[in-house]
Amino acid sequence: DFVFMVRETSQMFITGPDVVKAVTGEEITQNGLGGADVHAETSGVCHFAYDDEETCIAEVRYLLSLLPQNNRENPPRAESSDPVDRRSDVLLDLVPADGNRPYDMAKVIEEIVDDGEFLEVHERWARNILCALARLDGQVVGIIANQPQVLAGVLDIEASEKAARFVQMCDAFNIPIVTLLDVPGFLPGVDQEHGGIIRHGAKLLYAYCNATVPRISLILRKAYGGAYIVMDSQSIGADLTYAWPTNEIAVMGAEGAANVIFRRQIADAEDPEAMRQKMVKEYKAELMHPYYAAERGLVDDVIDPAETREVLVKSLAMLQSKHADLPSRKHGNPPQ
């Protein structure tokens, strides 16, 4: 389920440096070919990498404290001294209202979870998405969140695979899933399309749709296009969906949408740029105001960011007895 490695002493590869040199002529060391840092940052084979064995074993113990003994048990609860109704007013300053400004999603998670503690899985691979185990009022949860600091938080091939595997792990171990959205879409580009971003992105969609554990999603700012749908939107079965007042659920941003929808009006105008700005303003006013999503049933409620922790804890308590049966079959046939 998880791979831990220690720098300088752990290596993994299919063919060693000598074979690589004989076949391709490339010269490389064992660490350069399959060391801890390579697998933690580049290949994604390793979930955790540490400098020494003592730290590595301590982190293994910490991870085990968050997991159940088997798939028929729930994760172990812990007594929490962190108040359920603790307000997080700092979130109002931490997350800029301007959707184009980046921020550190890890700090948002720190502010919401018990005592600010969480264990990030695959921390250094596909860093535009963040997957972590944490506790809310003592209950273990899996958190999937876009990271606006890296590639603006877009979904690409590696991020889709990373998040899909984490969702499946949480579902296998009866861990409720909390999804924090601030996603501008899938990463555009020839390399992504030729690399199969459609089928890789579908892995995340499949994982969410197949998960039977409680699923809660929260939209912080942007939620654009197909990336919004596959990030546990209400349309694919999220149990509860919330949004902050800064939410923008749309096919794309206002500027891009206005250029497409009002193309003729802009082209025929005496001052195209002034007309474009006018159309962008109207589009935002009519379709991207804070309560647009709630009015159309896309979210269950628009909440005060400072009350995020309390809302999530109460939602988890409400969903504690959730039970869902999958269709009778040998197994699914996930996208490859």
Image (spheres, grey):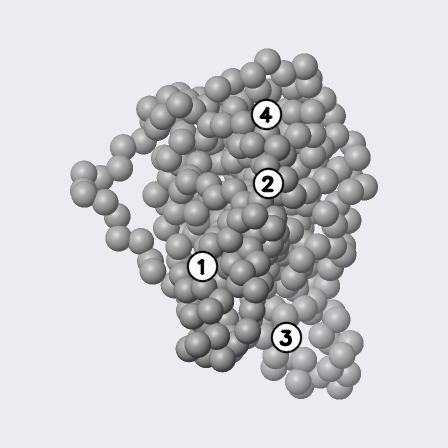
Label 3, label 4: how far apart the Cα atoms are:
43 Å
Q: Position of residue 97 (x, y in %)?
A: 76, 49
Q: Earlier in the sequence, mark 2 or mark 4?
A: 2
Label 3, label 2: how far apart the Cα atoms are:
39 Å
Q: Would residue 47 be found to the left or right of residue 213 on screen?
A: right
Q: Is residue 197 above or below residue 298?
A: below
Q: What amino acid type should be assigned to the residue bearing mark 1? A: Phe
Q: Earlier in the sequence, mark 1 or mark 2?
A: 1
Quarter of the image where the N terminus is located? top left
Closer to the eye: label 1 or 2? 1
Q: Earlier in the sequence, mark 4 or mark 1?
A: 1
Closer to the eye: label 3 or 1? 1
> What SS does tag 1 mark?
loop
> What SS does tag 3 mark?
helix
Q: Earlier in the sequence, mark 3 or mark 4?
A: 4
Query: Which residue has dot 1 on it?
Result: 13
> What SS does tag 4 mark?
strand
Q: Would residue 84 be found to the left or right of residue 87 on screen?
A: left
Label 1 Cα crowd, 10 Å radius (few <14 / some 14-19 / many 20+) = few
Residue drawn at (47%, 54%) of the image: 12
Q: Earlier in the sequence, mark 3 or mark 2?
A: 2
The numbered disc on residue 136 is 4
Q: What amino acid type should be assigned to the residue bearing mark 2? A: Glu
Label 2, label 4: how far apart the Cα atoms are:
15 Å
Residue drawn at (52%, 42%) of the image: 4
Query: Which residue has dot 2 on it?
Result: 120
Residue drawn at (40%, 29%) of the image: 174
* 47 vs 72, nearest the viewer: 47
